[in-house]
Amino acid sequence: MTNDTIPVEEYLAQGGVLTAPGNVPPRYRGELLRLMGSFVDSELAASAGFASAINWAPGIKERIAACRITLEKADHAERVLAVMAEFGTATARYQAQHDWAARVSRVDDLGQARQSGDMRLSVFHYPITDWTDAVVMNVLQGLATTVQMTELSQISYAPLADTFRQIAPREARHAELGLEGLARLVVSDPGGVRDSISYWMPRVAAGFGMAHSPRFDLQARFGLRRRPNEALRDAWQSLANTRLAACGL
């Protein structure tokens, strides 16, 4: 609840939280729905893209890990869609609006661009080519998601923050499963691992958005962001370098 004597934007800027759609001002609502849409679209696209890797798995343990990641990312999308439904989103129509498995050419370079009407991060438009590629992509993007979840778990819309706090440990586990697989691939396919890292590293980095984004100031005032894009990207880069080095890369 906001203090009746304080404008809602000032209340949010002071660290206040909102608890229901009826408390949400229009501009805040727009930014919140945009944030949720990006997460849902990215999770649905990640699930659909990683599903194709299940049959590339070299063993039962790896197959189970791939199935788990595919299932849980779809589940995470469903959980956030449930919050969007409270704002009037028609969830059945929303989840069917795109082909989540569709991908651009491997050689395309989308940068930070989003496709029309599709809010997934640009990294989820690129195809995965084989098991090594799937593991490397999962590691790098999984570590990026781990960093991003520190922001999402603290946003000022309490029901969504609670949902993200429930999701965060499972997303972190996806990255850990990838790192377990990566350690084995460094031995069996070191060249493939290095080639795949070179491909995915800049594409994952692009998912953090442009430095000095003009949207950040508005999101920060609303309590939807705390650290700017470049700080999150640097945190991911440091984390990725540390975890890759531990694998001998």
Image: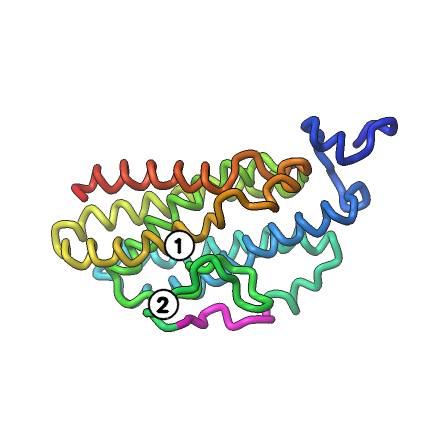
Depth check: give the residue in front, 87 or 191: 191
76 vs 240: above or below: below
**10 Å crowding of disc 2: few (<14), some (14-19), many (20+):** some
Q: Residue at x 41, y 45 (%)?
A: 144
Q: Amino acid at mark 2?
A: Pro
**Which element is circle 2 on?**
loop
Please give the range of residues in magenta.
96-104
> Which residue is label 1 attached to?
68
Tell me how many marks there are.
2
Quarter of the image for residue 3 reads top right
**Which element is circle 1 on?**
helix
Quarter of the image for residue 22 reads top right
Q: Residue at x 31, y 41 (%)?
A: 240
Q: Amino acid at mark 1?
A: Arg
Rendered location of residue 235, percent (x, y): 40, 36
Quarter of the image for residue 116 reads bottom right
The answer to whether residue 97 is magenta is yes
Q: Is residue 207 left or right of residue 54?
A: right
> Which residue is label 2 attached to?
127
